[in-house]
Image (tube, helix red, strand yellow):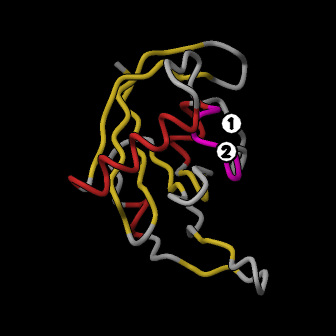
């Protein structure tokens, strides 16, 4: 398990997050930046679910993991951000897109975790 980190763009240095954030996730999970919707780190179960190599999801926009977005990535991100700001969480159904192009149905849950969003994926 890699230790999740965020990169300080002014210094280029990694700022470490406690490894428990992803390690405690009981499902495939990723840490997502609420500022730009990009994946900071994913646990091995999440990488496996999406057919990605280790580190292969890092830096990708969360919307890239969805095969059939019903709204633009910007609209969806704003709706998710509003829900998290109001209730501390968001959940919804999605069609996941694997690296090989195959798809699967899943439930996505987003929670605020130490200034980032913790995205958990549960195949339906």
| Magenta stretch bounds | 57-64
Q: Is residue 29 above or below residue 15?
A: above
14 on left or right of 105: right
What is the x, y in percent for residue 77? Answer: 49, 42
Residues at marks 2 and 1 touching, judged by CB atoms closer than 8 Å: yes
**To which residue does mark 1 refer?**
52
- Tell me the CA gap for discs 2 and 1: 7 Å
Numbered-mark total: 2
Q: Is residue 51 magenta?
A: no
The crowding category of the residue bearing disc 2, from other C-alpha atoms within 10 Å (few below 14, some 14 to 19, many at least 20), is: many
Predominant secondary structure in magenta? Answer: loop
For residue 57, the mark is: 2
Q: x and y percent of residue 78 in the render?
A: 46, 44
**Horizontal placement of 12 versus 64: left or right?**
right
Tell me: residue 3, above or below residue 47.
below
x and y percent of residue 81 in the render?
40, 50
Q: Earlier in the sequence, mark 2 or mark 1?
A: 1
Q: Position of residue 92 (x, y in %)?
A: 33, 29
Residue 12 position by quadrant: bottom right
| Viewer-side residue, 120 vs 19 | 120
Can you tell which quarter of the image residue 1 is in? bottom right
At x 39%, y 40%, the residue is 79
């Amino acid at each position: 398990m890699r230790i999740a980190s965020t990169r300080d763009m002014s210094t280029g240095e990694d700022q470490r997050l406690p490894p428990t954030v992803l390690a405690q996730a009981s499902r495939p999970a990723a840490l997502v930046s609420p500022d730009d919707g990009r994946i900071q780190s994913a646990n091995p179960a999440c990488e496996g679910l999406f057919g990605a190599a280790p580190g292969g999801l890092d830096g990708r926009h969360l919307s890239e993991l969805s095969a059939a977005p019903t709204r633009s990535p910007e609209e969806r991100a704003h709706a998710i951000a509003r829900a998290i700001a109001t209730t501390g969480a968001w959940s919804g159904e999605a069609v996941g897109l694997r690296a090989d192009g195959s798809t699967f149905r899943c439930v996505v849950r987003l929670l605020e975790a130490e200034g980032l969003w913790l995205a958990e994926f549960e195949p339906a």
